[in-house]
Amino acid sequence: MNLYWNAFGAVNLVLDLAIAAVFFGLVYMNSRLQPSKATLTICRQAILVTLLVWILAGLFVGGIIGFSLIARTFWTLLTAAVPLLLVFYAVRLKKAALIMPALLLVAFKYYGEVYEPRNLEVQRASLPVKGLKGSLRIAHISDLQTDGLGRLHQEVLAAVNGYEPDLILFTGDVRNHPSLDAPVRDYLGGFKSRYGAFFVGGNVDGLLDTAELFKGTAFRSLDGDYKKIKTGAGNIGLVGLGLEDSVYRGALEGLLGKLGPTEATLLLSHVPDALRITQGLPVTALFSGHTHGGQMCLPWAGPIFTLSGVDRKIAAGGIHPLGGLYVVVSRGLGMEGHIAPRARTFCRPQVLLLDLKPEP
């Protein structure tokens, strides 16, 4: 019942129909077994039991798939099943007032599935860095995690290339389905930078052939690797941590030891949890993604879940100075794949354009 189709569309539609069937079945059973109960009470009970059934199913499955199943249940009930039930009762009970909340829920569905995921935020910031000899322009993208390329992605490409970055940093999660490899390769080939574009893998990139994907593009995989680049701002060190090493301090210490002294060292890790292993080490900035900023957030309250162990304020995205370290977490461009609901609420997709400047 998504408002657009993707490679997982058939599976997700069957799942949505199953969630709705449980809900409508419970409404019908309750109305037969408890005819004296108010309609609102019957519907409330059906919602709670439906949630309980699918939450238990999600816990049984476990992992990200189980979590996605639970999230999909909430979204499908809120934006599809409940509006349909409201329309049914509006007709049956001849209460036109029920149409308004149904329309509001459908409008919220449109906002979350169509409007917000395309509502790109381009955040620019200037960061003073001690020891730099000049300015260094960095474009940070993360969690492309796309079901298909569209207008948003062209806006990202135009924003990044228009910034004329010295470096492009891509902190993982490329696409939601292997069928997208060819168009994604063509898309990545359009990015331009002065000194190169660098990538570390994310959760959905385990089977990704980065050598093939990046063929003909400026991107280079930096998982478990390092690179020293001579720039007008001085020697800039790049260190990349693969997922398996993102919480292993020894791996980071080893790479920093091989890298040697630099004017600034930039650490790339898909998960911001690498923050825990940077204390006391010569790292200027940590670049991460993974959290999608929560993807589905509440106004003023922020993310409901972040799937990260760092502070929620950091996981929500943005630039966070912590002592002598900048923690830069992108809200990403895409959305969780497979059976997860393709929706963003109060959490715009984001590209970060940063100007590292010498500290006065």
Image: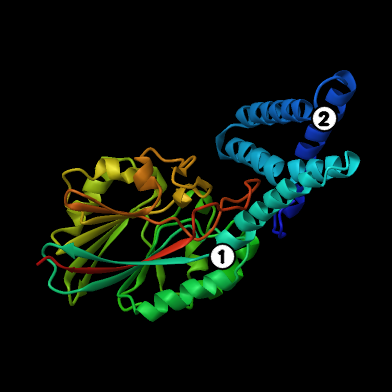
Residue 275, numbered circle: none
The residue beneath circle 1 is 118
Q: Position of residue 270 (x, y in %)?
A: 40, 51
- Circle 2: element type: helix
Of 35 and 117, the residue lying toward us: 35
Q: Residue at x 71, y 53 (%)?
A: 2
What amino acid is at disc 1?
Arg
In the image, residue 96 above or below residue 3: above
- Circle 1: element type: helix
Q: Position of residue 123 (x, y in %)?
A: 37, 65
Q: On the picture, is 249 further left or further right than 20? A: left
Of 221 and 137, the residue lying toward us: 137
- Kindly tell me whether residue 216 is visible in this rendering: no
- Kindly tell me whether residue 13 is visible in this rendering: yes
| Neighbour tally class for label 1: few under 14, some 14-19, many 20 plus, Cα within 10 Å | many
Rendering quarter of residue 250: top left
Residue 27, numbered circle: 2
The answer to which of marks 2 and 1 sits earlier in the sequence is 2
Q: Position of residue 215 (x, y in %)?
A: 49, 72
Q: Position of residue 142 (x, y in %)?
A: 44, 59
Rendering quarter of residue 334: bottom right
| Neighbour tally class for label 2: few under 14, some 14-19, many 20 plus, Cα within 10 Å | many
The span from disc 2 to disc 1 (Cα, nearest Å) is 36 Å
In the image, residue 72 above or below residue 9: above
Q: Residue at x 82, y 36 (%)?
A: 21
Quadrant showing the C terminus: bottom left
What amino acid is at disc 2?
Val
Residue mark closest to the camera, 2 vs 1: 2
